Image (tube, grey):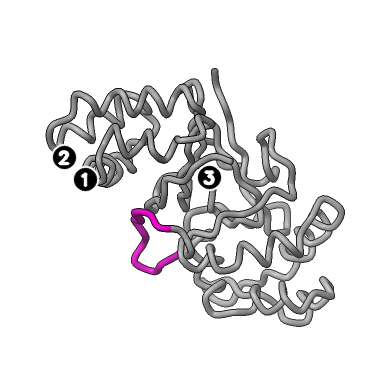
Amino acid sequence: MKLIVLLGSGLLTASPVSATLPQVVVKQNHESKTNNNENGYLDKITKIMSSEINEKNQKQIKVIFLNSIVKEGSLLKIDSNKIKQMQNLKLGKIFLSKEFSSILNELYASKSIVYQNNQFEFKNQKLLTTTRGLWIETYWYWFGYCKLHLDNQLTTDLADAFKEVYDPLGSIGAVLYIIPEFTTLAPTMGPALFVYGGTGYINSVNSLHKGIWFGTYGFLSFGWAGPWTEQ
């Protein structure tokens, strides 16, 4: 089974646009974050994004957001007058903040946002997976944040793989054996799962037998947080 995630196209999964966004800050879990704490900042604004952006307005907000981007020198910024067209003070405050400016320019540097056809656009970023039971959830307004979902069977396979793990190094191989796509995550994820208890810990998180999920920023490139129980 193959899945392709396209950042520019919104959420390409079975979940509705109004799905609840993750709140990493209030969860008890292991976290691996970037130096600039992108995951932490995005976690703080996800509740606002979830409540203010929906199926009816998300296309309009996306257009206004992209049209509000201007380039000064080598950096991008948001035009405060254009962003007011959203007529949403909460979103305007986020988009004009210094923290979001950092996120915006990282997206530009990584070519997640590009200038083409005389306008700024989200570039379709593809993440191809061949692991059955793995699917990726994201929206354009998560700005690079995504949720990596493992179904019950894949979670069980991961837990079983840890039965043969006896040290942190072996834990890395266990993660990669079950989920090859986690190349950049395994070096920290494997040892963390091992320290927390390996098989027993994974099974405890999957107590509802619905699977587990991890949060990540930058499509696996900038660390991870989790796991959490699928509800």
Q: At x 30% / y 29%, what residue is drawn? A: 176
Q: Which amino acid type corresponds to the residue marked 1 in the rendered image?
A: Val
Provide the residue designation for mark 1: 195
Number of the front mark, 1 or 2: 1
Number of the front mark, 1 or 3: 1
50 to 152, vertically: above or below = below
Using the rendered view, name the quadrant where residue 170 is placed.
top left
Using the rendered view, name the quadrant where residue 86 is placed.
bottom right
Quick check: 45 left or right of 192?
right
Provide the residue designation for mark 3: 147
Q: Which amino acid type corresponds to the residue marked 3 in the rendered image?
A: Lys
Residue 59 position, x and y percent, is 81, 54
Q: Is 78 included in the stretch rendered in magenta? A: no
Quarter of the image that includes the C terminus: top right
| Chain-order first, disc 2 or disc 3 | 3
| Chain-order first, disc 1 or disc 3 | 3
Between the C-alphas of marks 1 and 3, the distance is 23 Å
130 to 117, vertically: above or below = above
Q: At x 48% / y 59%, what residue is drawn? A: 24
Q: Is 36 included in the stretch rendered in magenta? A: yes
- Asked if residue 128 shows in the view, the reply is no
Q: At x 40% / y 32%, what residue is drawn? A: 181
Are there few (<14), some (14-19), or many (20+) residues within 10 Å of tag 2?
A: some
Q: In the image, which disc is placed on residue 168?
A: 2
